Amino acid sequence: MTKSIDIRPLGRRDRAAWGKLWHDYLAFYGAERPDDLYDLTFARYTDPDRSDMVAFMAWDGDTALGLVHSIAHPHGWQADPVTYLQDLFTAPEARGRGVARALIEAVYADADRAGRGSVYWLTQTGNTTARALYDRIAQATDFMKYSRA
């Protein structure tokens, strides 16, 4: 890990850097989204009146290294809300520097400050590089995700 990683909340000034990272994240999963969805998503994550959608970016000076998005929501099995870590991406040239861990820890800290002790996320089973980190900092479950056909 390098000392030059700075994690900060996503801000309006970050639109261009965020857009490139989110584009690259979506491309990693073979997904594309229209430009108006980029605008909507960015607006949601930077809206100061929303506490249910939070985003952070990792920086080394003026260079964007990664992003993370999380969504807080109620849970039917407990009184406290939970945090869903929806998107996590590190730029390829920044991998191996502790960026992903730092971004996950930012989500953990935000959840703790808000009284949401439970944080969860999904990844593809074949994403072995990411899973090596996740296995060190979280507990895998045996649940399988299903989506409406």
Image (cartoon, rainbow, N blue to C red):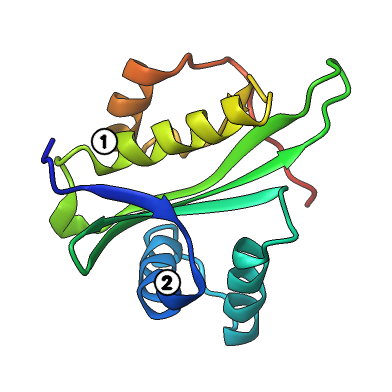
Within-10-Å neighbours for mark 2: few <14, some 14–19, many 20+: some
Q: Whole-percent x and y of residue 24?
A: 36, 67
Q: Which residue is mark 1?
A: 129
Q: Whole-percent x and y of residue 44?
A: 67, 66
Q: Quadrant of residue 57?
A: bottom left
Q: Whole-percent x and y of residue 130?
A: 32, 36
Q: Residue at x 59, y 51 (%)?
A: 54
Which amino acid type is marked by label 2? His
Q: Is residue 75 left or right of residue 3?
A: right
Q: Residue at x 45, y 52 (%)?
A: 56
Quadrant the N terminus occupies: top left
Q: Which residue is mark 2?
A: 23
Q: Is residue 106 left or right of residue 37?
A: left
Marks 1 and 2, how far apart in space? 20 Å
| Label 1 vs 2, first from the N-terminus | 2
Vertically, is 52 above or below 130?
A: below
Which amino acid type is marked by label 1? Thr
Q: Is residue 113 left or right of residue 23?
A: right
